[in-house]
Amino acid sequence: MSRKEKSIELLNKAVADELLAVHQYMYFHFRCDDMGYDLLSGLFKRTAIQEMMHVETAFRTYLVLERRSGNENLRGCSENPRTERNAGIGHGHGRR
Ligand SMILES: [Fe+2]
């Protein structure tokens, strides 16, 4: 497996982990809301939203890498100049 393929594989795993985190935080948001734990419910909701932003960061990083590799299908996308600076993804969610 080439370094590029390995990088894409790692990004895919980062996106999967972030999406799993979103799902789990939203689940506990709804559960706590249903049981009347409003403050905790709100905390889980805000955390889920932060995880959604991590998904976006990982995906934008993927787009930057694809553009640099010369993928014609992605040339029309606008590059976010913040993307490369904010590429701190995959920060230890792991499977829960
Ligand atoms: Fe995250």
Image (spheres, grey):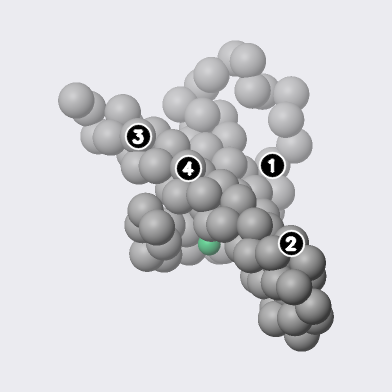
Q: Are marks 4 and 2 in contact (CB under 8 Å)?
A: no
Report the residue marked by disc 1: 79
Q: Which residue is more in the foreground, 59 or 52?
A: 52
Give x and y (percent) for residue 81.
68, 53
Report the residue marked by disc 4: 16
Q: Mark 3 vs ligand 1: CB under 8 Å?
A: no
User: What kind of residue is marked 2?
Assistant: Phe
User: What kind of residue is marked 4?
Assistant: Ala
Report the residue marked by disc 3: 9
The tag on residue 30 is 2
Q: Are marks 4 and 1 in contact (CB under 8 Å)?
A: no
Q: Left or right: where does residue 47 sit relative to residue 34?
A: left
Instruction: Pick whichever of labels 4 and 1 is earlier in the sequence.
Output: 4
Height in image: 65 above or below 20?
above
Q: Are marks 3 and 1 in contact (CB under 8 Å)?
A: no
User: Which residue is at 70% across, 49% downward?
Assistant: 80
Height in image: 35 above or below 54?
below
Quote the CA–CA distance across marks 4 and 2.
Answer: 21 Å
Callout 2 secondary element: helix
Give x and y (percent) for residue 19.
56, 47
User: What kind of residue is marked 3?
Assistant: Glu
Q: Residues within 10 Å of mark 2 (few under 14, many from 20)?
A: some
Quote the CA–CA distance across marks 4 and 3.
Answer: 11 Å
Q: Left or right: where does residue 14 sit relative to residue 18?
A: left
Quote the CA–CA distance across marks 2 and 3.
Answer: 32 Å
- Which of discs 4 and 3 lies nearer the camera? The answer is 4
